[in-house]
Amino acid sequence: MTFEQYVSTYGPALLRLARLLTGDQHRAEDLVQDVLARAWSRWRRIARSNQPDMYVRRMLINANTSWWRRRPNREISTASFADRPQRGDVGSETVARDEMWRLIQELPGRQRAVVALRYYEDFDDSTIAQILGCSSATVRTHAMRALNTLRERYRTLATATR
C-alpha cells in the first residue's frame, strides 16, 4: 500500500480519532497533519509492518500526549456553561451531547484514548491494547474507570442542572 492510498483510505478515521482525543477540530487537523508528515518520511518501514494502521494510530496517540506535556499548551476549562437546556428545548439533545464531550475531555489521556478507540472507532480490546502498547486487561481497566468517572460526573451534572 502506498502512502497516498493509506491516507485516502484511513485519513478520515485518523481525523475522527484525533478529534476525539483533542476535542477540537482544528487541533485534530494539525495533529493528523504532523503525524502523517512524520509517517511519510518513514513510510517504507511502516508499510512493511504487519499493521501500518495500528502503527500510525499509535503515533497519533503519542503525538497528542506529547503535545499535552508541553507547558504552554495547557488550557483552562470552566465548569460552567453559558447556556443550559430548558424543558422542551429543541437543542437539549445537542447540549447533552456537548456536555458529554466536555466530560470525556476531562478524562486522563489513556482513558480518553480507550473510550475513543472502543466506543467511537469500535475496536476490540486486543486491537486497542496493540495500539496503546499495553495488555487487554489494562484496556478493560481503563475503560471501566473511565465509564465510572463519566457516570459519576454526569449524575452530578444532571442534578446540578435540575
Image (cartoon, rainbow, N blue to C red):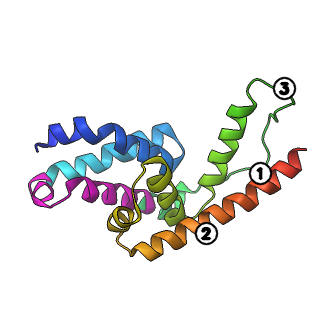
Distance between the alpha carbons at the discs numbered 2 and 3: 33 Å
Q: Is residue 153 above or below residue 16?
A: below
Residue 12 occupies quadrant: top left
| Residue holding disc 2 | 145
| Residue holding disc 1 | 79
Q: Earlier in the sequence, mark 2 or mark 3?
A: 3
Start and end of the magenta stretch? 43-65
Q: At numbered mark 3, what does the secondary structure look like: helix, strand or loop?
A: loop
Q: Earlier in the sequence, mark 3 or mark 1?
A: 1
Tag 3 near tag 1, CB within 8 Å: no
Residue 81: within the magenta?
no
Q: Is residue 109 left or right of residue 80?
A: left
Q: At numbered mark 1, what does the secondary structure look like: helix, strand or loop?
A: loop
As shown in the figure, which amino acid type bears the numbered disc 2? Arg
Distance between the alpha carbons at the discs numbered 3 and 1: 24 Å
Query: Does the rendering let one see residue 75?
Result: no
As shown in the figure, which amino acid type bears the numbered disc 1? Ala
Residue 56 occupies quadrant: bottom left
| Residue holding disc 3 | 88
What x and y, as percent, mark residue 76? 66, 53
What x and y, as percent, mark residue 40? 17, 48
